[in-house]
Image (tube, rainbow, N blue to C red):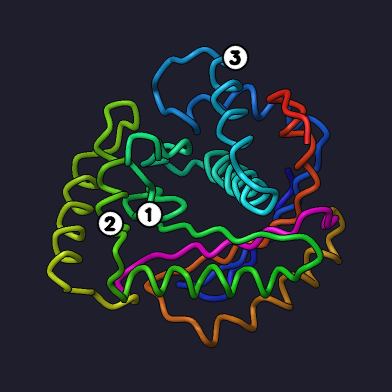
Amino acid sequence: MTHKIYEIDEKASVIVLDIEPENIENYLIENIVSICEGHSGTDLEIIKIRLRDYLTKKDINKRIGAIAEFYIHLFLKFLGYKQNFLFLNLEENSIKKGFDGYFSFNGEEWIVESKSGIDVTHKAKVSEAYRDLKKKITTKENNNPWQNAYNHASLIDVGADKTVINKLKLLSDSYFKGIFFPITNYNLMPCGTVFNHNATDEEIKDAVFNDIKTTLKNMEYKNICLIAISNRAYDAFLNFIELEE
């Protein structure tokens, strides 16, 4: 994984990330259990079985989306972010995630939304992720994202700080009451993944950055980090968990 960070100002930044299949297995071996199940201590082979079962039930678009999301969690853990949820969202037990990710870093929480595709632009997917975040945060739907985030953070194996859990509970209760706080209260991470795109070269990373930075003028936030991912490790993930396409 190679990446470049572009600082726009004190509140906004862009990360352009390239994920290639070489050596990705080492990252997966070290992190896949904790990303999927937290501090459960589950054996790696059991996690592979769970992931095969999880992905087998999904159509190709949802499978692509799930794998794109997993790699974002892997990258943020690599940067030192604390994961306050489980990737395997336990839908069988009615514990959904709401947001694609809820992370902590240096005393701040960050909300992640992931969108992905093939033969699309990073700009389009990052913009779509932002719109989805804004909708979840500022409008009421049947699915309360804060309650789902609270349910995940409260799990013992997640190991979230009590302050994070309490904050999510207050936001969940407010959501049920129809109380919505401005999107400028939140740190946002809209992520756009384009599969089979190569952004190894610095010039390509710079071109991706120059394209998506223009979206910031239409976005509101407390702090924001746009993440544009070029991912060529889709097959490598399936091979690692021994799932045939």
The answer to whether mark 1 and mark 3 are in CB contact below 8 A is no
Query: Total label count?
Result: 3
- Which stretch appears magenta? 185-199
Dot 1, how many residues are within 10 Å of its Cα: few (below 14), some (14-19), or many (20+)? many
Q: Is residue 62 above or below residue 80?
A: below
- Sequence-first tag of 1 and 3: 3
Question: Is residue 169 or residue 23 the one in the foreground?
Answer: 169
Residue 168 falls inside the magenta stretch? no
What's the mark number on residue 45?
3
**Contact (Cβ within 8 Å) of mark 3 with mark 2:** no
What predominant SS class does the magenta segment belong to? strand
Q: Quadrant of the C terminus?
A: top right
Instruction: Please tell me which residue is depicted at 27% across the width and 72% down the height of the picture.
Output: 140
Is the Cβ of the residue at disc 2 closer than 8 Å to that at disc 1? Answer: yes
Task: Calculate the distance from the C-alpha at mark 3 to the C-alpha at mark 2.
Answer: 32 Å
Q: Is residue 86 above or below residue 219?
A: above
- Return the x and y of residue 169 as percentages of the image width and height: 17, 52
In percent of width and height, residue 165 lies at 22, 45
Q: Which residue is labeled 2 in the image?
A: 146
Left or right for 234, reference 68: right
In the image, residue 138 lies at what x, y percent? 31, 75
Q: What crowding class fits label 3: few (fewer than 14 Cα within 10 Å), some (14-19), or many (20 or more)?
A: few
Indicate which disc, 2 or 1, sits on the residue closer to the N terminus: 1
Q: Is residue 100 above or below residue 141?
A: above
**Residue 244 location, quadrant:** top right
SS under mark 2: helix
